Amino acid sequence: MIELLASSLGRKDEVPNIELAEIISEKGDAASVTEIVSGLKDKDTGIAADCIKVLYETGYRRPELLSKHTEDFVSLLDSKNNRLVWGGIIALGTIADIVPDDVHKHIDKIKKAYGNGSVITVDNSITVFAKLCSSDKRYMDELFPLLIKHLRECRTKEVPQHAERMLVCIDKDNRDLFLETVRERAKEMSASQAGRIKKIERSLTPKNKC
């Protein structure tokens, strides 16, 4: 499968990597996932970057195929290659609700990546935290305050997207606090940004039954 990566084909676009992920996903090919995971350690940074792209694209489609590789993705968070760091976080985000205990074991390292990472790393850390919250009350108690703090302190333009990522963990117990927080931030927003908040509100408003 390594020979089908974009770098191996002399390509500079991501199309071959996405196509490979589609093939792996359609076949449910766990053996190929393991082969691609091995490429994360390749000294050729292009190969490694292609591998993480294939893996998280596979995770979007068939996350269960990545579920045995939590440790491999966590190890990327120590990389000096920022592409591998945020790729690792994206991959973790695809499986955080499938193997939450395996992911949570590394919560301190994930929090560190969130605190020090790029915009993409932060975005996808929110997905990891929210999915962990949705999977277990213990994780909800631990991490939901972090999510609310993030909503209160992040840049205004980031609030709609991050609030959307958090929807997976919003329930009857935390709904009011969540909505109160995003409504307060909406006062600072442009019309289009505030419109996304209104859409979130509508999605959380109980519909009256006839």
Image (cartoon, grey):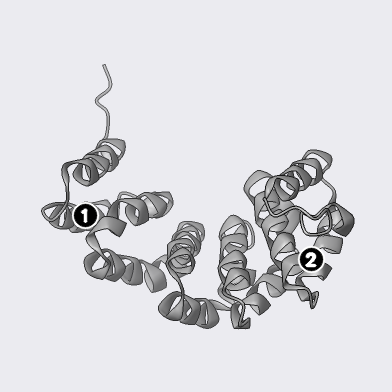
Mark 1 vs mark 2, foreground winner is 2
Q: Amino acid at mark 2?
A: Val
Q: Is residue 64 found left or right of 39 in the rendered image?
A: left
Q: Nearer the viewer, residue 59 or 136?
A: 59
Residue 182's label in the rendered image is 1
Pinpoint residue 57: horizontal percent, then vertical percent.
Answer: 66, 50
Disc 1 + disc 2, Cβ < 8 Å:
no
Q: Is residue 164 above or below residue 112?
A: above
Report if residue 174 is visible in the image. Answer: no
Where is residue 7 drawn, in percent x and y?
Answer: 78, 59
Count of number-bearing discs? 2
Left or right: 48 as drawn, with respect to 187: right
Q: Residues within 10 Å of mark 1 (few under 14, many from 20)?
A: many
Tell whether 166 sits left or right of 93: left
Report which residue position mark 2 lands on. Answer: 37
Q: Where is residue 193 shown, x and y percent of the image?
A: 23, 46
Q: How many C-alpha atoms fall within 10 Å of the one at disc 2: few (<14), some, or many (≥20)? A: many
Quarter the C terminus occupies: top left
Q: Is residue 131 above or below residue 101?
A: above
Q: Quadrant of the N terminus?
A: bottom right
User: Is 187 situated left or right of 102 in this image?
Assistant: left
